[in-house]
Each structure stands twice: as structure tokens, then as C-alpha cells.
Amino acid sequence: MSKRPRRNHSPIFKAKVAIDAIKGEKTLAELAKLHDVHANQIVDWKNQLLERAAGVFGSESSTAAPVVDLKELHAKIGQLALENDFLAGALSKAGMLSVKR
């Protein structure tokens, strides 16, 4: 007996199958035969959908703002300002920058 090659299902397909399972209009055996997947796989996808459904509407963990290191950002701004001033001076000495900002 030859093994079936491993299949990778798209997220859209998984969602469709999981929604069909949640609806409950057909049994797991019918859904498994219809979509050509194992019934245990359908149960897993259904559970994943139910667990992550709250994330669609925004979860509490996503409302927290990311931590920003202001000290690092100010240092980067200072470095870029210094580089701009240096390059502007070098270009004006070379005669390539005639207009001052």
C-alpha cells in the first residue's frame, strides 16, 4: 500500500471546512468524505477557529502599545542630524550645494 503524499491545505480551505463543522448541518464523517480529509483534522481546525475567533474582533493583548526605547530613538535622531550637517558642509565646500536650508 503506497502512502499518500503530504498535503498542505490553504488557510481559506481550513476555515471553510471548520465553519462547515461548526454549522453542524453534516456529520464529521460526511464532512471528512466531502472534503477528503480525516475527521480528526476537521475537529482540530474547528477547535483552532473557535479559540482564535476573538482575535478577529481584537483581543485585549493587541491593545497594548509596543514598548519604545526613547533614549535609543533620540540617539538615532542625533546621529542622523550630525550626518546631515556634515554632508551639507562637505557638499557646500565642493560647490555642489549652493542653497542653504
Image: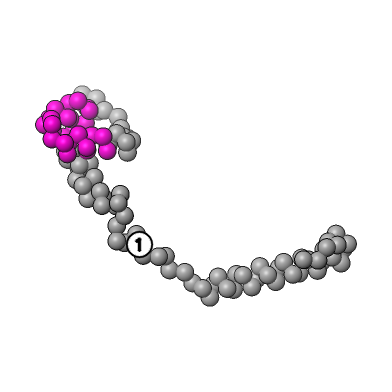
Q: Left or right: 8 with respect to 29?
A: right
Magenta residues, dominant SS class: helix
Q: Left or right: 24 with respect to 15?
A: left
Percent of width and height locating residue 7: 30, 32
Q: Is residue 51 above or below residue 86?
A: above
- Disc 1 element: helix
Range of residues picked out in magenta: 15-39
Where residue 73 sits, quadrant-wise, is: bottom right
Read off the residue under disc 1. Answer: 63
Q: Left or right: 33 with respect to 95?
A: left
Asked whether residue 31 is drawn in magenta, I would say: yes
Q: Residue at x 49, y 72 (%)?
A: 69
Q: Left or right: 70 with respect to 8?
A: right
Q: Is residue 86 above or below residue 1?
A: below
Q: How many marks?
A: 1
Q: Residue at x 32, y 36 (%)?
A: 12
